[in-house]
Image: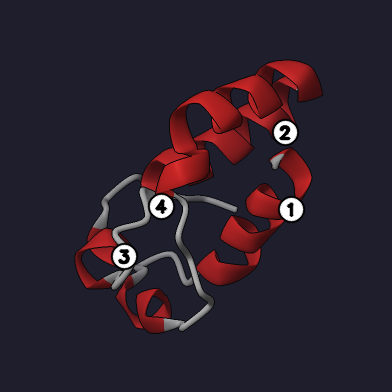
Amino acid sequence: MSCTGCKRCETICPENTPISELMHLLKEYEETNDFEKIKETYQRDFRRRTGCVNCGRCLSYCPEKITIPYYILSVKEDFA
């Protein structure tokens, strides 16, 4: 995953999900493997703001061709 944080995906998200912030959180988890810290951050800062419904609209806006819904739903499942 190579999210650049451009936020193009967020302009089309019908749920206003903070995609770039969640992708950054996931990258931080991959780098640190600190599950408890990332889970705490997710629950405190993002749980109520993560409304992704897997509509896929963001996919055509991502210049890196990241499968955004897959990653966002993984974050929701892993850290909820």
Give the colour scheme shown. secondary structure
Alpha-carbon distance for marks 1 and 3? 21 Å
Query: Residue 4, can we see it?
Result: no
Q: Give the labeled residue for mark 3.
A: 9
Q: Nearer the viewer, residue 14 or 67?
A: 14
Note whether 24 is above or below 66 in the view shown.
Answer: above
Alpha-carbon distance for marks 4 and 1? 15 Å
Report the residue at 60% width, 53% height from top: 1
Q: Indicate which disc, 4 or 1, sits on the residue closer to the N terminus.
A: 4
* Left or right for 6, reference 20: left
Residue 45 drawn at (x, y percent): 45, 28
Q: Give the labeled residue for mark 4.
A: 19
Q: Give the labeled residue for mark 1.
A: 77
Category of crowding for the residue at label 4, using alpha-carbon neighbours closer than 10 angstroms: few (below 14), some (14–19), many (at least 20): many
Report the residue at 58% width, 31% height from top: 43
As drawn, the residue found furthest toward the left would be 11
Q: Indicate which disc, 4 or 3, sits on the residue closer to the N terminus.
A: 3
Callout 3: helix, strand or loop? helix
At label 1, the amino acid type is Glu
The image's mark for residue 24 is none
The image's mark for residue 30 is 2
Category of crowding for the residue at label 1, using alpha-carbon neighbours closer than 10 angstroms: few (below 14), some (14–19), many (at least 20): few
Alpha-carbon distance for marks 1 and 2? 16 Å
Q: Nearer the viewer, mark 1 or mark 2?
A: 1
Alpha-carbon distance for marks 4 and 2? 16 Å
Give yes or no for contact between labels 4 and 3 (Cβ–Cβ under 8 Å). Answer: yes
Callout 2: helix, strand or loop? helix
Q: Nearer the viewer, residue 72 or 33?
A: 72
Residue 15 drawn at (x, y percent): 33, 66
